[in-house]
Image (cartoon, helix red, strand yellow):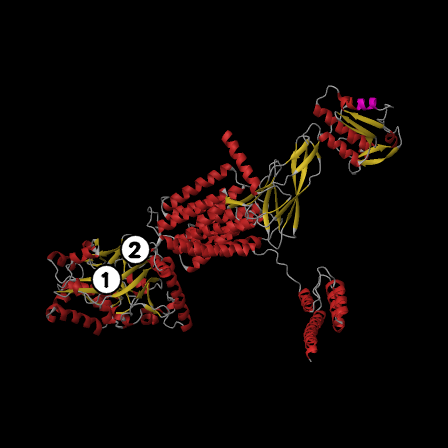
Amino acid sequence: MAVVFQIPRNCLAALLVAQLAVLAPHLFRLPLWVSAVAIVCALWRLLLYMGRGFYPSGVLKTLLVIISIVAILSEYGNLFSLEPIIALLITTFALKLIEMKSRRDVLVVIYLAYFVAATHFLFEQGIIDALYILLTAALVTGALVALHETEERPALSHAFGASTKLIAQAIPLTVIMFIVFPRIDPLWSVPGAESRAKTGPSDSMSPGDISNLAGSSDLAFRVSFDGSIPPADQLYWRGLVFSHFDGRRWSAGSNKSAEMSWTQYVRSVSMDTSKLSDASSYTVTMEASRQPWLYAMPLARSDTKSVLQAGNATLRTIYPLDQRFQYRVNSWQNYVLEPELDGYRRGIELQLPDGFNPDTLDFARQKRREAGSAAAYVQSILRMFNREQFAYTIRPPKLGRHSVDEFLFSTRSGFCEHYASSFVVLMRAAGIPARVVVGYQGGELNPFENYLLVHEFDAHAWAEVWFQGRGWQRVDPTAAVAPERVESSINELLAEEIGENSALPFFNFRELPMLRWARLRWDSVNYSWTKWVLNYDTELQMQVLEEWLGQVNGWRIALFVLLSGGAVMLLVALSLLRQKVKHKLHVIDKCYLKHVRAAGRLGLKRSDGEGADTFATRVAAEYPELADSAKRIAHLYNSIRYNTHSGQQAPTDLQRKLRNEVRQFVRAAGMQTRKATVNEADHFAAPAS
Amino acid sequence: MVLQNAIQRRFSAWLDRRIPRSGEITLNQRRIFIFPSRAGVVFLLLVLGLLLGGINYENNMLFSFAFLLLGVFLVTILHTYSNLSGLTIRSTAARPTFAGDFADFELVLSRSGQRRYEGIRFAWADADPVTADVVKGTQKRISIFVPAPARGVLKLGRLLVETYYPLGLIRAWTWLDFDAKCLVYPKPEASRAELQSISEATEEGSYIQQHGSDDFAGFKDYIPGDSLKQVAWRNVAKGLPLMTKHYQSQADHQIWIDWDQFEGEDEETRLSRMCYLILFAEQQAIEYGLRMPGLSFSPAMGTLHKLQTLQALALYGQQR
């Protein structure tokens, strides 16, 4: 007499809702056909749920699995990076949904749903994402509850209510575990997300690259300073240094510097670190750029793990950043970088391609002769940019083969990369070592948490010029054309030009103060989330635990876990077991009992089960003064409780009468008590008189 | 094997001390056992997988998700426990049944307060387990139909009460000893030979009536063991329940149902035959007496007589 298992209908309904919620954030990331498969499977299951449709046969199922694997392989070319794995996971999840029959199948689908929900965190980890996944966790858990419900026809909301309660009770435990669980190093390397678009400057720069970035309002990184924020004209966030020019593109070239530690670096450039002083310390939180370079003000040193020092005084990581990355930096303003340049290095920093920009080369040599000194030559070029008809624009005209010639002598309008590029070419043509530096400039202050927001549109290119004995000096030719660029944000500068078809909806110059307030407020919340939750690492953990426990050792942590976890479990247990016999008294009964207690003070105890009338008669016999009142109370009580309005809410006027009557009775009884004591006192006093 | 038996004995002795025999038991921490189910173990493996993901991707959100599920697991322990604790289970006496039939053991589940008890499974001996809940009202009665294969006293061992609610990750269970018993009468069996012997045993020798040969006295409810010949099939065809025709003159007769009548039959067959005869005589309103080795009931009729004689058959040759 084996009972055939039937998936509870509620469970199926809950599962469909949960599946939809779990898949929704993935649908935009996945190839269209995977989303289509997921939706078709959900609809198929819906048909089965409604009693139509058929279960797929074995052959069909095998066919579907093979087709999916082949399709994923042809889509991604392999199965071992993150996206194909997740596509496979989701396809399995969707297909499993239609063949699900036994209790075990349902469990597999539910567990897969948890897993798929969790994979969203490999792509996004914001507050909204966290809340959303919390919601899906409640939905999936709801399906699990519905699987175990046996009541005839429970409401679907009951399962979801129960699961929400479970999740809510689990959250404090989650927090405790999150705080104390040791963050250990990765055990093995895992496939990362590959196909995600890279953001920020790339490893080379051609005309138009930086101006493309200027159209993006995405966040590049946030910086919070330990001390005060330096003035805007010092906020040059160095990222990449380009020394090789091929006529059009700037790249690192053979100057591709080796990565090393700080000490190695200091030795390699023979820097005198003892002269460095007044470091400003700050923490940079980079968004996932999927590039390995990091940004910092010169001269930067970082001791954060997995940050490397590159040869040209930049910072980088070992691997491209797949997720937000936080690093600490010390920067000194009074540095001297490479005071001496040997012949080999000099050759690199003077390189120019043959057969490009002949007019520029002639112009440079002539100007250099006129200027006399190198420094005067630099000034004369900057003055030229400043005085002559050069324009700063985000939409410069296209340039041909001799890009610098065309820019300098005919178009004369460009974005920062045009100025930086032509400036360096002009320097090199005159025999002065120079190079292009790409990074970000400036930043928006968030007053709520006092940190800087650096956006993609803050991307900037400038130049570094080498002087004998003084080393590399920053020269920003854009500042000569448009000094406001450095002083204020590009948006304010280009607000007119960007105008209506702006890619920066929030960043319009005419942004409403309310909107700006909301945007900055929200960003500060996000930043705290990133700082305290997403970047909670061993270091921060030690800091927090030390602050709470005084001293971090195994015993204290164990005690902390036991006490806090135990307290949570105790509260949950109490809330579950508490609702024992809690016999709620009816309002009328409460009122009546008040009168009984008053009578009790006069020595009249009501026995259990004694009727109101009987009791009233006894009261009347003992205390004739209270007889009327007691009888009226008994009558009212009985008529409310038993006669006229059984089971229903008593009419309010009768209730009010009873309440008044009881109040009067209590007062009268109180007088009786006093009288009794006075009488007794008289009685005792009498013989003495 | 010896060791296993010894362990089993030890366990049941311990269980007897811990959850002693009783007619009504309220479940509490002394009586409830709790442990992760297989699904719970798989769930923990899932959590472990997520933790490994969190470690390898250095992803705090994956950590949080793993901890959230672990937290749900921990909290579920309390939920599952409270789904049994406080529930009062009372076992009521089971009505006697016939061998080969089912014994209906009734359990009364009651709760105090407003706590919900959902998805509680009761498994007793070979019976199909029953799943029940107490969500509305304060009481609920459930029946567990236990197969009664043999005559005698059907004694049930401990009743397994278990629940996986709400998530199936944790199993809370208990073994209750209600000292539940049910009297099992022999399976009634008729045969031509035996009917013959009845006719010999009665003085007039012809109490088995042909249809219409006596005054028709009315219908009686059909009970198992009645001759199909006496069933009022015409009524059945009209959709009425199974009934047997009853004739007046039969009441005048007396028979003895005698152990020795069934020469050559084995013990159980004799008892089955005798059981049938008792039911038959009662049905036909014939006074009957019962003679068995060491036991005898003088001819009589009525429910009490029937129960006494059937009980004698049921307990024949048994210790108690």
Q: Residue A133 appears at what percent x and percent y?
A: 45, 55
x, y percentage for residue A419?
A: 23, 66
Q: How far separated are the C-alphas under marks 1 and 2?
A: 19 Å
- Can you name the residue that lies furthest to the top here? B264
Q: Residues within 10 Å of mark 1 (few under 14, many from 20)?
A: many
> x, y percentage for residue A328?
28, 61
Q: Of label 1 and label 2, which has the lower sequence position? A: 2
Q: Which residue is mark 1?
A: A300
Whole-percent x, y for residue A383 in the image: 19, 73
- Extreme residue toward the bottom, this view: A689
Amino acid type indicated by mark 2? Gln
Q: Residue B192 occupies which quadrant of the picture?
A: top right
Amino acid type for the residue under numbered disc 1: Ala
Task: Nearest to the eye among marks 1 and 2: give it.
Answer: 1
Is residue B200 highlighted in magenta? yes
- Res A516 → quadrant: bottom left
- Residue nearest the viewer, comparing A259 with A543: A543
Tell me the magenta residue range. Answer: B195-201
Q: SS class of the residue under badge 1?
A: strand
